[in-house]
Image (cartoon, grey):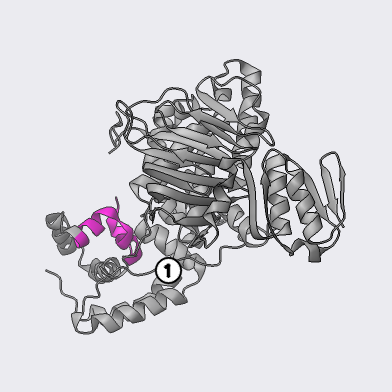
Amino acid sequence: MSSSPYNPQQDEQFLWVRLRNGDRDAFGEIYRRYFPLLFRYCIRFTTDRALVKDMLQDFFSQLFVQRAGLSLPVSLKSYLMVAARRKLFRYLDKSAHGPASLDEGTASTFALELSPESILINRQHTENATRLLQQKLNALTLRQKEAVYLRFYEGLSYEEIADIMVLKEVKYARTLIYRAIAELKELLAQDESALMFR
Amino acid sequence: MNYSEFDAADFAADDLFRAWVLEETGAAFWEGWITAHPEKEAALQDARALVLALRFRTNEISMEEMDAVKDQIDLLLDEPVIKKNNGTARRRWYYALAAAAAVLLFAGIWYAQGSEPPIENILVQTGFGETKTLQLPDGSIVQLNANSSVSYPRKWTKENVRAVTLNGEAYFNVSKSPAGLHPKFRVLMPQVTIEVKGTAFNVYHRHDQVKVLLEEGKIVVNDSLDMKPGDMMSFTPGAHHRLQADPVQLTAWKQHRLLFRDTPLISVAQQLEDIYGYKIQFRNKKMEGLLFTGAGPADDPSMVLKAMATVHQLKMKQSNSVIIFE
C-alpha cells in the first residue's frame, strides 16, 4: 500500500547513493523493500518477535544516522543481511547471558520447518515421507540449515551466502549445501523413482 | 546463464527453474532444454524433487507491525537535532542521536536532557513530584505523572497516524476520529505499541516494563492483542501477561494520591524513587519483602514514608533525597 514513486526496477545503487545524501524517501524505500526479508530471516534464530523488531528498528535508525560513513555495497541485499545478522547476534548475546560471547555465540536455533505445501512426488506415502524429510532437516547442523534456507528460499548465490555467514571462502558455502543435500538425497531418491517428466 | 554447468542444487535455487516447477511458466524453454541436454536429466529430476519438497514455513511480519516500527524510527529521526545544518556540529549530533537511539531502547530517559526547543516535535515533561495535564492537537487529553515525558509532532495531518512517544506514566483520554486527522492513534514505546480506538487508558513505562490499564473503549497492543475495559496487561521484553493487580492502585496518581495495597517495600521504594527522585535503601534484604498497605497525598510523600517505618517498626534516616531504612 506504499504510494512510493519508485518502480521495482529502480537501480539499488542509486537508491543507496540517495540514502547517503540523506534522502528520507530513499530510506523509506529501502525499509519497505528489505524489512520483510530481514525479519523473516532473523526470526529463524529466535522465537522472540519483539526482540527482532527492536533490533531492526535500531538497525534501520542507525543505517540512516550513520549513512555518511556507508560504503557502496555490491549487493544491497547481502550487505543488509550481513549487518542485520551481526547485530542480531549481539542482541541475542545480550538477552541470553550478560557478557557477549564470541561471534557465533548464542544463535542456538535455526527454524527450518517444511510448509504444508511441500510435496513429495510419490503421493502414496506423502505424509510419512514428509515427516521423514522434516526429521532429516532437523538433523542438519544450524549452519547447514541456514545455508539451505539462504540458497533455496532466498535464492542467494554461494558468494552472498559466504558473505552473510562469515565464511572464509566461497567453497565452504558450497560444501555446506552439498552435505545437506546429500543427507536429504537418499530420501528424495526413493521418491524420484516415481517421478515423471511431462 | 550457463545451465550446462549447473548441478541439482544450482537448478533448485534458480529462479527460472523454480518458476517452471512451481508455477509452470517457461515450460517450452525447459522442455526444449532437456531434449538438448539429456545428460542433465537426472540432475533436473533431483532439482525438481528438491524444489517441491523444500518449501519452508515462514514467519512473516504484517504490514501494520512494519508501519509501527517505521513510525518509531521516523519519530526518532525527526527529533529536532537532525535539522541542524552545519558541518561539524552536524556530525556530532549524529553520534549523539545514535547513542540516544541505543539508550531509548533500554531505558528511555534521554528526553531528560532535551536542551534545544523542538522544531518538529513537541516535548512535554514533568519533574519529580510534578504532574501535568495537556491537550494534544487532536483534542485528546493526556495527564502526565511525575518524572515522565511525551513527545509528538507539532503538526498532525490526515495522512499520518496520530502518534505519541511516552516515557514514564500517563493517562490518555483519546478523541475518537477527529475531523481532518488520521483515525488511528498510537502510543509508541520501545517494546510496545498501543493502538487506540477512542478510549481512556493508563500507561506505565519505566525500567523496561510497560503496564497498560484500559478503562474505556478498545485498544490493540502490538497489532495483535486486544484489550477490553478493565483489562490490565504487563509487557516485558519478549513476554506479556495479564495482571491481577489492583487498577485503583495504578491510577491513584491521577487523584494525586499515593496508594499501596499489600505491596512489598522494595516496590514501594521503587515507585517513590521514580516519582520523587529519592534514593531509598534498606539495611537488609528481609525488609525489602515486607508488605505495605497505606495511602497518602501525592504532594507529601513523607506521610507514606513515615507510615512504612511505623508499620514495620523500622528506623528511617533521611539526608536530602537519600533515605535509609534500618
- Residue B167 magenta-highlighted: no
Q: Is residue A24 visible?
A: yes
> Looking at the figure, which quarter contains the N terminus of chain A?
top left
Relative to B19, does residue B253 appear above or below in the rendering?
A: above
User: Which residue has dot 1 on it?
Assistant: A178
Between residues B203 and A130, which one lies in front from this camera angle? B203
Q: Position of residue B267 (x, y in %)?
A: 69, 56
Main secondary-structure element of the magenta-colored stretch: helix
Q: Position of residue A188 (x, y in %)?
A: 30, 77
Span of residues in magenta: B1-22
Q: How many marks?
A: 1
Q: Position of residue A70 (x, y in %)?
A: 54, 33
**Residue at position x 19%, y 84% from top?**
A124
Between residues A157 and B259, which one lies in front from this camera angle? B259
User: Which amino acid does the dot numbered 1 rest on?
Assistant: Tyr
**Residue at position x 42%, y 22% from top?**
B155
Q: Residue furthest top?
A: B86
Q: Is residue A13 visible?
A: no
Q: Residues within 10 Å of mark 1 (few under 14, many from 20)?
A: some
- The answer to whether B195 appears left or right of A89 in the picture is left
Q: Position of residue B320 (x, y in %)?
A: 85, 38
Of all chains, the one bearing label 1 is A
- The answer to whether B163 appears left or right of B304 in the picture is left
Between residues B259 and A60, which one lies in front from this camera angle? B259
Q: Secondary structure at mark 1?
A: helix
- The answer to whether B139 appears left or right of B247 in the picture is left
> Looking at the figure, which quarter contains the C terminus of chain A?
bottom left
